[in-house]
Image (cartoon, helix red, strand yellow):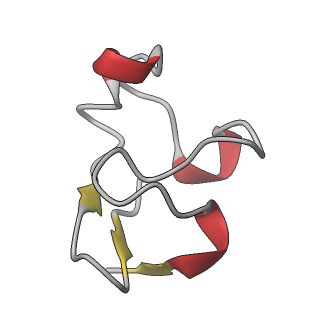
Amino acid sequence: MDKYVCGPCGYEYDPAVGDPDNGIAPGTPFEALPEDWVCPVCGLGKDVFEKA
């Protein structure tokens, strides 16, 4: 699974880790994140993320 990086702040979404603080289980691919999921660091949407 590919990692994705938030362009503005540099946060890296790692599917192996997920985002447990926001209810995203480990093993969740970026493509399967809910459309309303936002970067846990800067609060911007999925559209600002690029494949690492």
Residue at 42% x, 21% y is 22
Q: Which quadrant of the view contains residue 3?
A: bottom left
What is the x, y in percent for residue 24? 46, 22
What is the x, y in percent for residue 39? 43, 53
Residue at 25% x, 76% y is 9
Camera-side residue of 27 and 40: 40
Q: In this rendering, would 51 be left or right of 36? A: left
Residue at 49% x, 31% y is 28
Camera-side residue of 20 and 1: 20
What is the x, y in percent for residue 44? 53, 64
Q: Is residue 50 above or below residue 23?
A: below
Report the residue that reaches farthest toward the right. Answer: 35
Residue at 28% x, 53% y is 41
Q: Is residue 2 above or below residue 49?
A: above
Q: Is residue 45 above or below residue 33?
A: below
Q: Is residue 41 above or below residue 19?
A: below
